[in-house]
Image: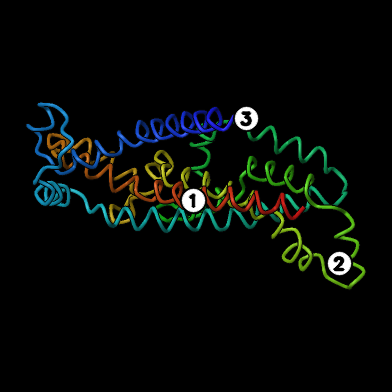
Amino acid sequence: MYMRRYLNKTLIYSLLILLAVISFIPFYMMIVNATRETKDIIMGFSFLPGNALIENYKTMMDYVNIWAGFKNSLIVSVTVTVLSGYFSALTAFGFAVYNFKGKNKLFIFMLLMMMVPGQLGLIGFYELNKALGFLDTFIPLIVPAIASPFVVFFLRQYLASTLHPSLLEAARMDGASELKIFHTIALPIMMPAVATMSIFTFIGSWNNYILPLVVIFSPEKYTLPVLMGFLKGSQVAQNLGSMYLGIAISVVPIMIAFLFFSKYIISSISAGSVKG
């Protein structure tokens, strides 16, 4: 019995290690190719890095200031993630806890908005920001992203299944205000769900390409996806090493988000289930 259990565990871990290696190979290829010359990349893949990293970096920086785009994307993505997490949690709290006129119709309308592609309203969105004077600023990239129907729906369902009405009644009997109840009771309960949605919100904002391309005109305000698009259309595209280097820099925050925050989410959900 012990030997059989040991063999099963060995087989499971071997498969997991194999899957991890297969998943890591594309990232390793990208990093290695960022250090190689174009002719070496065309000849085939090598597991050993090259010595053209500095030349590739200089070639890339001669055409685009990728660190300015990195900074702009980081500002927009972090702001959207924080604001979307907070206000979506606040909205979900209202839907889950309170009864008000038109609540169900408003919730159904929000669900319908989840099914409408954002590209359909792009022209109207452009004209609206033009009338308000928000073009060529980060406001069109941040403010609309705060109202995320899917995040509100997810948090509302999570809160409805985890928040017991007796907690709210006890807090109100102690004289706590509704905002204090939200910040001290509901928000901590929702934190695992908020953290989960924050990862997808951050990645979606980081990879957003169409909207910044439409509303941003100044090169110093371009986000990283827009700069990468220009990089592919410039002479740098002939230098494959520079292209791989730019892509590697652009995916670093996404890799960090998955490596660190996914572990935090799993541990938070497990801890919450044990405490419950």
Question: Which badge, 3 or 2, comes first in the chain's sequence?
Answer: 3
Which quarter of the figure has residue 239?
Answer: top left
Q: Which tag is nearer the camera, tag 3 or tag 2?
A: 2
Q: Tag 1: residue type?
A: Pro
Name the residue located 76 percent from the left edge and 40 percent from the top edge. Answer: 107
Q: Position of residue 122 (x, y in %)?
A: 49, 37
For the residues labelled 2 and 1, say whether their Cβ atoms are less than 8 Å apart: no
Give neighbour class at mark 3: few <14, some 14-19, many 20+ (Cα, 10 Å). few
Dot 2 or dot 1, earlier in sequence: 1
Left or right? Give the position of 226 relative to 75. left
The front one of 149 and 222 is: 149
Element marked by disc 3:
loop
Point out which mark residue 171 bears: 2
Reply above or below: 104 against 8: below
User: Label 3 to label 1, Cα distance in Å?
Assistant: 21 Å
> Which numbered circle lies on residue 140?
1
Q: Nearer the viewer, residue 37 or 47?
A: 47
Local packing at callout 2 (Cα closer than 10 Å; few below 14, some 14-19, many 20+) is: some
Residue at numbered disc 3: 115
Q: Quadrant of residue 150?
A: top right
Q: How many numbered dots are placed on residues in this image?
A: 3
Question: As shown in the figure, which amino acid type bears the numbered disc 3?
Answer: Met
In the image, residue 6 lies at what x, y percent?
51, 33
Question: Residue sitting at 47 percent across and 28 percent down?
Answer: 11
Which residue is painted at 35% across and 34% down in the image? 21
| Residue type marked 2 | Ala
Q: Position of residue 235 (x, y in %)?
A: 13, 38
Q: CA distance from mark 3 to mark 2?
A: 37 Å
Q: Between residue 234 and residue 36, name the one nearer to us.
A: 36
Viewer-nearest of discs 3 and 1: 3
Disc 2 or disc 1, which is closer to the eye?
A: 2
